[in-house]
Image (spheres, rainbow, N blue to C red):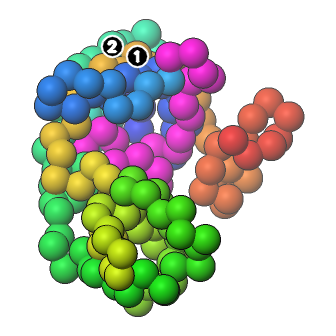
Amino acid sequence: MQIAKHKVVTIEYTLTDAAGEVVDTSDGREPFSYIQGTSSVIPGLEAALEGHSTGDTLSVSILPEDGYGLRQEALTATVPRERFESDGNLEVGMQFQTEGESGLQVVTIVDLDEDSVTVDANHPLAGATLNFDVAVVDVRDASPEELSHGHVHGPEGHAH
């Protein structure tokens, strides 16, 4: 069966950055399952997998425009340190969930001093070319329930 819209796709993958460093991998974990055509994975990976079948392997480089987007400097802001409900243990790299103009968003601390904190709401992989090594483990039809919920259900009917 080929990967097409509304098929449940199960993959094993390793994601590396331009320097060849592993950013994310399914190695040592359960393979990743998603429904093709529901924007569950980045557009470039979904497009690269379209038409592939169980047992196929592929290596693909995805440009930022088809990944997590280009970096937007407007998503970086410096705010007074007292806006953080913390006991002062703030560190560069910490992430917080905040209420933004478009709903909940995750911001990462990229710089701080005694008075202010610089946060970045860009996805950590925005602007990055993503290199995926993928093995297609399984392709099957999505159930009506999975399609209505928009995510894959496990063997016991639980969402992953």
Q: Residue furthest right?
A: 156
Given contact means CB atoms under 8 Å apart, are the residues at marks 1 and 2 in contact? yes
The majority secondary structure of the magenta stretch comes to loop
What secondary structure is found at the residue carrying circle 1? Answer: strand
- The range drawn in magenta is 27-46
Quarter occupied by residue 75: bottom left
Magenta stretch: residue 101 in it?
no
* Residue 18 appears left or right of 108: left
- Nearer-the-camera pick, 69 or 11: 69
Q: Is residue 51 visible?
A: no
Q: Residue at x 37, y 56 (%)?
A: 92
Looking at the image, residue 57 sits to the left or right of residue 26; the answer is left
* Residue 71 spot, x, y in % from top left: 17, 63
Q: Answer above or below: position of 96 versus 11.
A: below
**Quadrant (top left, top right, bottom left, bottom right) of the C terminus:** top right
Q: Where is residue 120 drawn, in percent x and y? A: 30, 68
Residue 135: which disc? Answer: 1
Q: Earlier in the sequence, mark 1 or mark 2?
A: 2
97 with respect to 143 (left or right):
left
Q: Residues within 10 Å of mark 2 (few under 14, many from 20)?
A: some
Looking at numbered disc 1 in the image, what kind of residue is underneath it?
Answer: Ala
The residue under label 2 is which amino acid type?
Thr
Pointer 2: what residue?
A: 57
**Snapshot quadrant of residue 149:** bottom right
